[in-house]
Amino acid sequence: MPHPAEVDPRLQAHLRSWLGAWPPTRPVHVVGSERRVEPGWDGAVRALNGVATPDGAVVSVPPDAQAKVAAAVEELEADGVDDVLAALGERLADLLDLPGARYGAGVFRWSTEPTESDDPGTWLPRDDPRVPAWLHPFNGDVLVALVDDGSAAAGIGRKQHDAHGHELAVVTEEAHRGQGFARRLVTQAARRVLADGAVPVYLHAESNVASARTADASGFPDVGWRILGLFGGAAGTP
């Protein structure tokens, strides 16, 4: 497992920008960041963001909530990063005044060596008429695999969180699933992100077997890191 302080410098720069601090200096490091009160890649404000590793976690909250969330961590009678986060997660919606929100975690992956593949996609501006509507919200151009009739078989959007980290999101139209579009587009997009000087990131739910399979095949290993967030209610997702 990679140590948080020893991963690619681009990833460390992304996490410092996105969360407000990296690496964690204690098992659960609570940091107040202006990023938690500013619009994210899609214009939504996310009052909680975090990344956990087996060696420690950074939990990013609004600056005016940092002291009370850090105090809550100190009060917890729990041992180990996972147990502390689980206990803290039960209180975060109240601590951040987000009624109805629920705490959750997903798989956090990144790649500096995507697998080899052909390039099935074409980079297009979001307003190109061939771009499907679900790709319109992403910031920046999008990668689309077009078939003979000119329609999109699959596509990737980039959530450009900052100059150092771009999160990839891929969707394949149902009629074209099982043809390898997702894997090949992810590797093509990852090479573009790396060429732009950033690191490609891939997030998915623990239960999403298809996404896990795509990530593994594309050179995005699961190294035990997790993305943390609040979902539903008034909360935005990471």
Image (cartoon, rainbow, N blue to C red):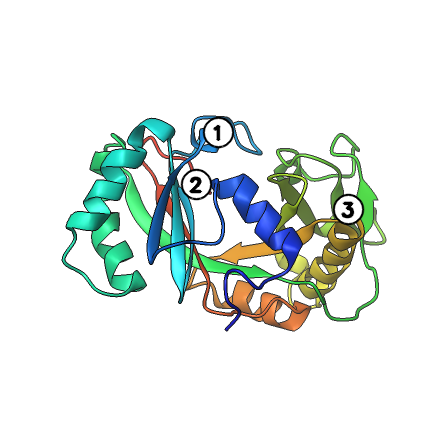
**Secondary structure found at label 2:** loop
Ranked by sequence position, the earlier of labels 3 and 1 is: 1
Q: Position of residue 16 (x, y in %)?
A: 53, 44
Task: Identify residue type, mark 3.
Answer: Ser
Where residue 10 appears, as percent x and y from the top left, is 66, 52
Q: Could you tell me residue 69's position as x and y percent? A: 26, 40
Q: Quadrant of residue 80?
A: bottom left
Q: Which mark is residue 237?
A: 2
Which residue in the protein does label 1 denote? 44
Separation (CA) of disc 3 from disc 2: 30 Å
Q: Secondary structure at mark 1?
A: loop
Q: Is residue 98 above or below residue 22?
A: above
How far is disc 3 from disc 1 in space, using C-alphas? 30 Å
Residue type marked 1: Ala
Residue 9 % position (x, y)? 64, 55
User: Label 3: which residue?
Assistant: 151
Observer-nearest of 215 and 110 = 110
Q: Secondary structure at mark 3?
A: loop
Check if mark 1's residue and mark 2's residue have beta carbons within 8 Å: yes
Residue 23 seen in render: yes
